[in-house]
């Protein structure tokens, strides 16, 4: 699991050093515990501690706390304006004119964390054009956003 | 023995005249994620007008909103939760929570679990149980959204909690119950006294089992959103007599628990319980229990 997490972090030009001894897996889902919790978790748990994400076919589908941990590090990030924040949460892609700040090269194909103007992580996406060369139009493809919680609520 | 008039007559005998409540939506700030003053400022900027609920530390009525309180970045970032006002009371009655081991025996969908984690400042351990897998998924989503870090969830019937081999300093028993008419328009059509009696039996079974895993110095908060005394005062009276539990005094919103129910006299300490008839909140019943009763 640590490999998948490191691979995922590297998509953002970043790295994470998580304590592998505090990581537990339940089927394909991975969780990070604290010391107190580790003593209370038996193998048949359903959910525990911080949800890091799930792996499918060797690929990581991250939890939001993992994205937050990455956002605290040096990583590719964009900050978006208020209107774009809401559109992104609604599952929409990001237009260049909604981006107010870029950390990283902003090159086509890179993954970026998407933050609001308070520095709170809203999700992540993939850059579809070189941001430095683009003035307007479709710039970042939405891959995951916190609106997912609402979509999950509807499912359950 | 069912129907609206049947239940209304029962409430009259218990000293309350039925009237349709005017419920207000309520939210609770997750103070582990944001300070209330900062949260209030953000809600003001959004155009969400809130007013402090006088009997809660972090609870606010939603007075005016141009949009759903559940469709904001702030909600999705876990800065607040939508939680009915009376439902915020039980967790607030624990005397101390930080760094404790806490059992949330009937946890889904998780509003009170996230409230526990918040008051524990994400320290200590919460063990949250439920038996419905779909509701466990909702609980897990709730924990993730609110950035809870100190909770382990098991798909387990609270009546089998001993098998975990753990002891707890605090136990929250927010019981499966018959509910009340304030949150369900068809409640009077749906419910019969047999449902109430069946739920009361289930609640006793859960109480009897969870007492086994309570530390000697521990506390239990027992709550239901039922107005039926079989699930409330009568069950607590049974617990005092049979489970060596005592009802502790609490400073809480609500009326004193009934000590005479349909002609049956109950232990005087039952008055330490709190019964909340529906008005601005839904109906609720809550009390704090500790070991050392009269059994």
Image (spheres, rainbow, N blue to C red):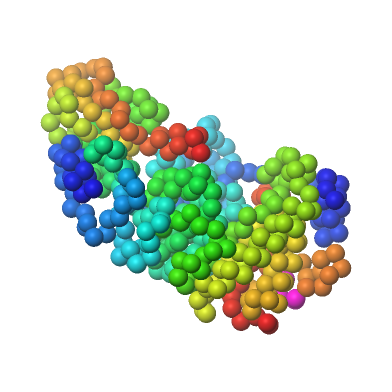
Q: Residue at position x 45%, y 41% from top?
A: B75
Q: Residue at position x 71%, y 66% from top?
A: B235
Q: In the rendered image of this protein, does residue A83 appear above or below residue B284?
A: above
Q: In the rendered image of this protein, does residue B204 appear above or below residue A8?
A: below
* Count of number-bearing discs: 0
Q: Which residues are magenta?
A: B267-271
Residue B103, image x, y percentages: 49, 64
Instruction: Locate residue B217 relative to residue A145 in the image: left or right.
Output: right
Asked if residue B186 shows in the view, the reply is yes
Question: Magenta stretch mostly in which secondary structure?
Answer: helix
Along the line of sight, the residue nearer the viewer: B128 or A44:
A44
Q: Residue at position x 44%, y 56% from top?
A: B153
Residue B295, image x, y percentages: 68, 82
Instruction: Locate residue B179 relative to residue A115 in the image: left or right.
Output: right
Corner quadrant of residue A32: bottom left
Q: Residue at position x 45%, y 37% from top?
A: A152
Corner quadrant of residue B149: bottom left
Asked if residue B54 shows in the view, the reply is no
Residue B116, image x, y percentages: 48, 59
Residue A94, image x, y percentages: 29, 24
Q: In the rendered image of this protein, does residue B20 appear above or below residue A89?
A: below
For residue A75: magenta? Answer: no
For residue B269: magenta? Answer: yes
């Amino acid at each position: 699991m640590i490999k998948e997490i490191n691979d995922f972090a590297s998509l953002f030009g970043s790295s994470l050093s998580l304590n592998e001894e505090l990581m537990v897996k339940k089927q394909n889902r991975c969780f990070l515990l604290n010391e107190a919790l580790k003593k209370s978790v038996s193998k048949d748990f359903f959910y525990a501690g911080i949800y890091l994400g799930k792996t499918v076919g060797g690929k990581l589908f991250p939890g939001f706390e993992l994205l937050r941990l990455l956002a605290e590090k040096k990583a590719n990030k964009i900050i978006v304006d208020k209107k774009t924040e809401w559109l992104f949460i609604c599952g929409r892609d990001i237009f260049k004119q909604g981006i107010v700040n870029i950390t990283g090269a902003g090159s086509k194909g890179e993954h970026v964390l998407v933050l609001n103007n308070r520095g709170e992580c809203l999700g992540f996406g993939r850059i579809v054009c070189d941001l430095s060369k683009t003035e307007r139009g479709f710039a970042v493809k939405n891959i995951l956003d916190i609106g997912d919680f609402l979509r999950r609520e509807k499912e359950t | 023995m069912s129907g609206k008039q049947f239940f209304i007559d029962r409430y009259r005998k218990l000293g309350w005249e039925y009237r349709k409540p005017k419920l207000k939506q309520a939210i609770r700030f997750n103070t582990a994620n944001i300070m209330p003053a900062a949260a209030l400022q953000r809600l003001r900027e959004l155009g969400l007008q809130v007013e402090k609920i006088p009997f809660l530390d972090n609870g606010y009525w939603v007075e005016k909103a141009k949009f759903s309180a559940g469709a904001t970045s702030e909600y999705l970032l876990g800065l607040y939760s939508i939680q009915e006002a009376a439902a915020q009371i039980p967790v607030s009655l624990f005397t101390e929570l930080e760094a404790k081991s806490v059992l949330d025996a009937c946890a889904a969908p998780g509003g009170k679990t996230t409230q526990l984690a918040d008051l524990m400042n994400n320290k200590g351990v919460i063990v949250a149980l439920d038996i419905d897998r779909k509701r466990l998924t909702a609980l897990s989503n709730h924990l993730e959204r609110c950035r809870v870090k100190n909770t382990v969830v098991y798909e387990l019937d609270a009546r089998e909690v001993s098998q975990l081999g753990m002891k707890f300093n605090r136990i929250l028993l927010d019981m499966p119950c018959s509910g009340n008419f304030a949150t369900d328009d068809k409640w009077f059509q749906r419910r019969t006294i047999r449902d109430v009696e069946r739920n009361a039996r289930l609640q006793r079974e859960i109480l009897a089992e969870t007492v086994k895993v309570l530390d000697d110095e521990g506390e239990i908060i027992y709550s239901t959103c039922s107005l039926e005394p079989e699930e409330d005062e009568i069950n607590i009276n049974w617990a005092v007599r049979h489970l060596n539990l005592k009802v502790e005094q609490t400073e809480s919103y609500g009326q004193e628990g009934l000590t005479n129910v349909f002609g049956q006299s109950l232990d005087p300490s039952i008055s330490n319980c709190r019964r909340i008839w529906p008005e601005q909140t839904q109906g609720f019943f809550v009390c704090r229990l500790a070991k050392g009763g009269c059994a």
